[in-house]
């Protein structure tokens, strides 16, 4: 999962008071002769930080050849990136351009430390119309000028093992009910129908959101107040939890899966028939010896009576420019370059990303059907997580509550609808109190 969480908005708001001293690009240089050097913090997208350097190095060289602008890049792991950005916001020792998880956008926007992409800035990077709308909608709070733009797209899909489905006489599911029925038929002996990252609070929060969206529910009202106890949110979470509890199609050991990689590995090694994961799982699946023609992908199915066919949240990585950069024009040229069709095609395969541009072709896989499925999900069946400054608190509270639900089930207990509502009420009160 690349879109990790930022800090609580209350802390961000307080920290923003010191951003007036932020001199973005303090390590950058510019002179009257036109020589410019940008500093760029890239997030770890590939198999390692060294791999990212190998992938991005030639791309940045090409940018310098085209523009004369040099880019000093540092690749930062996801465990450290949010802290580094926080320190940059408060200390003034900031880069010119930085990658962010797109679910951080509103929290970062609230600091006032980042350059808004107004009409002039948006024109400089090729115009807002070039982006997939759902991707661009992750750039900041609704109704506000975005302070980030998409660069790498990700979406959830339901991966299924073709051989297992064929042996059981099954077709890829199109509804939640069919998916559960298929999973039950595949659950036998040591094999389970599903693997879940049930110990990951971020994954659990994502699926709480998606299932709630399928029920037509919102996590926050129009005033930004949390609505975690609504029937649509609670019932959506119960539906997902029941994959382990009442449906018994996920191993209770999944409660200890603190990240998505273990669930993906179970799928790739034939321990389960299906897994819900993002398209960047392809590299891990292939690395485990499963070829791309051995699995299929369909959109995450909604119930038959669903109010909306949402199949994913709009996942991915955005680019932001620090407002006080001394190299604004050069930074905008760099953002334009990174979001150009050529660069998107170059980086799509090694970073297993979906294109964020309209009509662009997905190149992360050699499986044309898979590429089309994920492109369709990303463009037409995805909804951004709530772009409110306290979205990260939703993930921390609701996601961790769901971790506990799965742990309770794994230890032989049960979780009722009332239990979920009570826990979500506590989460709702906590988020509301934090403002």
Image (tube, helix red, strand yellow):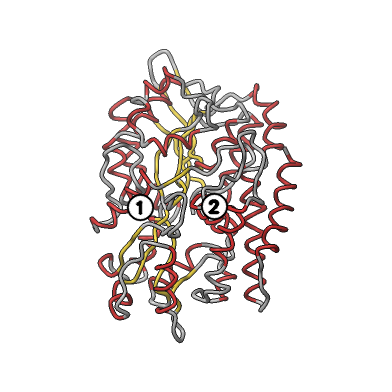
The residues bearing labels 2 and 1 have C-alpha atoms spaced at a distance of 28 Å
Above or below for 50 versus 245: above
Q: Are marks 2 and 1 in contact (CB under 8 Å)?
A: no
Residue 142, how many percent across, how many down?
53, 31
Q: Is residue 433 left or right of residue 146?
A: right
For label 1, the crowd category at 10 Å Cα-Cα, with few meaning under 14, some 14 to 19 and many 20 or more, is many
Tell me the quarter of the image containing the C terminus.
top right
* For residue 242, above or below residue 144: below
Give the number of the mark in front: 2 or 1.
Answer: 2
57 sits left or right of 86 in the view: left
Q: Position of residue 351 (x, y in %)?
A: 37, 50
Query: Label 1's element?
Result: loop
Residue appearing at x 29%, y 78% in the figure: 169
**Residue at image point 62% right, 75% down:** 410
Between 17 and 398, the one lying in front of the other is: 398
Residue 339 figure quarter: top left
Residue at image position (45%, 43%) is 317
Q: Position of residue 60 (x, y in %)?
A: 35, 36
How packed mark 2 is, by other alpha carbons closer than 10 Å (few <14, some 14-19, many 20 or more), is many
Q: Which residue is mark 2?
A: 212
Name the residue: 51% across, 55% down.
211
In this view, the residue farthest toward the front is: 305
SS of the residue under disc 2: helix
Q: In the rendered view, would you say 355 is above or below 158?
A: above
The answer to which of 139 and 289 lies nearer the viewer is 139
The first of marks 2 and 1 along the sequence is: 2
Q: Nearer the viewer, residue 316 or 320?
A: 316
Residue 189: mark in rendering: none
Residue 282, position in %: x, y? Answer: 35, 60
- State the residue position of label 1: 352
Residue furthest top as drawn: 32
> Which quadrant holds residue 253?
bottom right
């Amino acid at each position: 999962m690349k879109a990790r969480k930022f800090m609580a908005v209350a802390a961000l708001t307080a920290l923003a008071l010191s951003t007036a001293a932020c001199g973005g690009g303090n390590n950058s240089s510019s002179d009257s002769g036109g020589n410019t050097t940008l500093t760029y913090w890239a997030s770890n997208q590939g198999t390692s930080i060294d791999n990212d350097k190998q992938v991005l190095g030639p791309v940045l060289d090409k940018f310098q050849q085209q523009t004369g602008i040099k880019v000093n890049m540092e690749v930062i792991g996801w465990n450290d990136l949010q802290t580094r950005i926080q320190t940059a916001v408060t200390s003034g020792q900031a880069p010119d351009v930085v990658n962010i998880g797109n679910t951080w956008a509103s929290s970062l926007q609230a600091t006032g430390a980042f350059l808004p992409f107004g009409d002039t800035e948006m024109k400089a990077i090729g115009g807002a119309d070039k982006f997939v709308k759902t991707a661009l909608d992750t750039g900041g709070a609704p109704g506000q000028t975005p302070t980030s733009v998409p660069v790498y797209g990700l979406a959830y899909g339901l991966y299924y093992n073709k051989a297992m489905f064929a042996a059981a006489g099954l077709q890829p599911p199109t509804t939640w009910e069919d998916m559960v029925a298929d999973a039950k038929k595949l659950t036998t002996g040591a094999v389970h129908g599903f693997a879940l990252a049930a110990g990951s609070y971020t994954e659990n929060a994502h699926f709480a959101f998606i299932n709630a969206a399928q029920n037509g529910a919102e996590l926050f009202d129009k005033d930004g107040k949390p609505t975690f106890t609504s029937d649509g949110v609670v019932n959506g979470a119960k539906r997902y939890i029941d994959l382990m509890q009442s449906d018994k199609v996920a191993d209770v050991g999944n409660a200890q899966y603190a990240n998505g990689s273990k669930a993906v590995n179970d799928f790739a090694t034939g321990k389960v028939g299906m897994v819900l994961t993002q398209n960047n799982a392809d590299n891990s699946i292939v690395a485990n010896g499963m070829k791309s023609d051995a699995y299929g992908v369909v959109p995450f199915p909604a119930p038959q009576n669903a109010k909306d066919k949402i199949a994913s949240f709009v996942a991915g990585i955005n680019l932001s420019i620090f407002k006080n950069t001394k190299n604004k024009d050069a930074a905008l040229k760099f953002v334009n370059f990174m979001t150009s069709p050529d660069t998107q095609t170059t980086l799509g395969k090694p970073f297993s990303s979906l294109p964020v541009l309209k009509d662009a072709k997905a190149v992360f896989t050699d499986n044309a059907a898979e590429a089309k499925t994920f492109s369709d999900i990303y463009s037409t069946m995805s909804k951004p997580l709530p772009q409110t400054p306290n979205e990260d608190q939703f993930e921390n509270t609701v996601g961790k509550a769901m971790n506990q639900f799965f742990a309770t089930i794994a230890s032989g207990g049960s979780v009722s609808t009332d239990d979920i509502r009570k826990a979500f009420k506590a989460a709702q009160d906590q988020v509301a109190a934090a403002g």
